[in-house]
Image (spheres, helix red, strand yellow):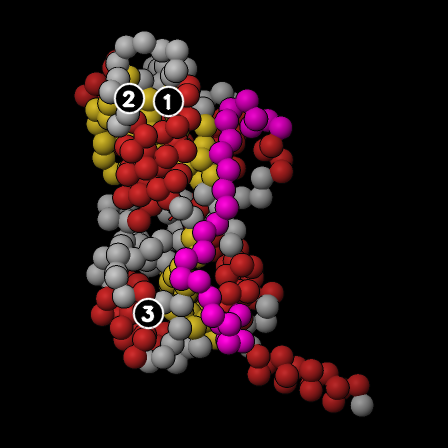
Amino acid sequence: SGVEVDEEANQSEQSDSLVIGFSQVGAESEWRTANTQSIQDAIADAGHELQFSDAQQQQQNQIMAIRSFISQGVDAIVFSPVVETGFETVLQEAKDAEIPVFLVDRAVDIDDDSMWVTFLGSDFVEEGRKAGRWLVDELADVEGDINIVELQGTVGSAPAIDRKEGFEEIIADHPQLTITQSQTGNFTRTEGKEVMEAFLRSDGDNIDVLYAHNDDMAIGAIQAIEEYGLKPAEDIIVIGVDAVKGAFEAMVAGKMNVTIECNPQFGPQLVELIEAHFAGEELPKRIAVEEDMFTMDQAADLIDSRTY
Ligand code: AHR
């Protein structure tokens, strides 16, 4: 009967269905929310089962989540490490349990790449370079010293380390550009605002540029700049990273100059990679996500087409 056919179809689907444990960084930014959504949707659409764990930006929570995935015997672990160091032991435990690990978004600082199948994520150093190159171009005709304040991402995280490195690499060739203050805002709006308030209190009249390692901190800082009585994007150039909707809104409102894209919507690509691995394919150890950059004058035309 029709019922039996359905059951058979269901059974064969189930035998291909994987249990995937995903240890996510947290919910600190618009980017992160979009990333979680993309991965959850793609896993559900493919008929796999997801065990989701939000680490609330705490390394300890990630170590506990991965241990719990191992003891449950999940088929695969997807892992976005909050910081680069300190995960050797738990990754070795996953390897010993023969559970394949897929690193996404953020890298770990471990030489032994046999601990993961592949790393799918953005080139954060290049994002920092893009921010630096945009600024150098923007200021090509400006004479005199330029003071830059930097809102760093989470201390010890790959995007904070790499975005700083890429940006500094570019401005190093331009001695008139100096980073005068630099502190972490932990990738959140609240801390971005608080730290920008402190920057303004200590040297408010001498800040020319804000380089924020993500848009959420830039958006928090924009509020601080306005409350201080200055005009964001006019009195202080504002540079962000991610290209989230909130950044487009700020650019359309004339309050932010540029955002460097960091694409969080790699859920479908991730699921393809996991399935390819289980089909016996050999995957490259590093797969980069392709990205762009958007300025204030493009924002109004593009805002409706943005999907995160
Ligand atoms: O790891 C990616 C970064 O983490 C995003 O740029 C930031 O918004 C997020 O919190």
Does the beta carbon of the residue at mark 3 sit less than 8 Å from ligand 1? Answer: no
Measured as percent of width and height from the top left, residue 18 is found at: 51, 76
Indicate which disc, 3 or 1, sits on the residue closer to the N terminus: 3
Measured as percent of width and height from the top left, residue 154 is found at: 28, 45
Q: What residue type is labelled 2?
A: His
Q: Residue 114 carries which label?
A: 3
Q: What residue type is labelled 1?
A: Val
Circles 1 and 2, Cβ within 8 Å, touching? The answer is yes
Q: Which amino acid does label 3 sit on?
A: Ser
Q: Name the residue under label 2.
A: 174
Q: Mark 1 points at which residue?
A: 136
Indicate which disc, 1 or 2, sits on the residue closer to the N terminus: 1
Q: Distance between the residues labelled 1 and 2?
A: 8 Å
Q: What element carries label 3?
A: helix
Measured as percent of width and height from the top left, residue 216 is found at: 40, 37
Quadrant housing residue 51:
bottom left
Q: How far apart are marks 3 and 2 (CA)?
A: 40 Å
In this orientation, which residue lies closer to the viewer: 98 or 133? Answer: 133
Residue 281 falls within the magenta-colored stretch: yes
Does the beta carbon of the residue at mark 2 sit less than 8 Å from ligand 1? Answer: no
In the displayed structure, 63 sits above or below 10; it is above
Mark 3 Cα shell of 10 Å, populated few (<14), some (14-19), many (≥20): some
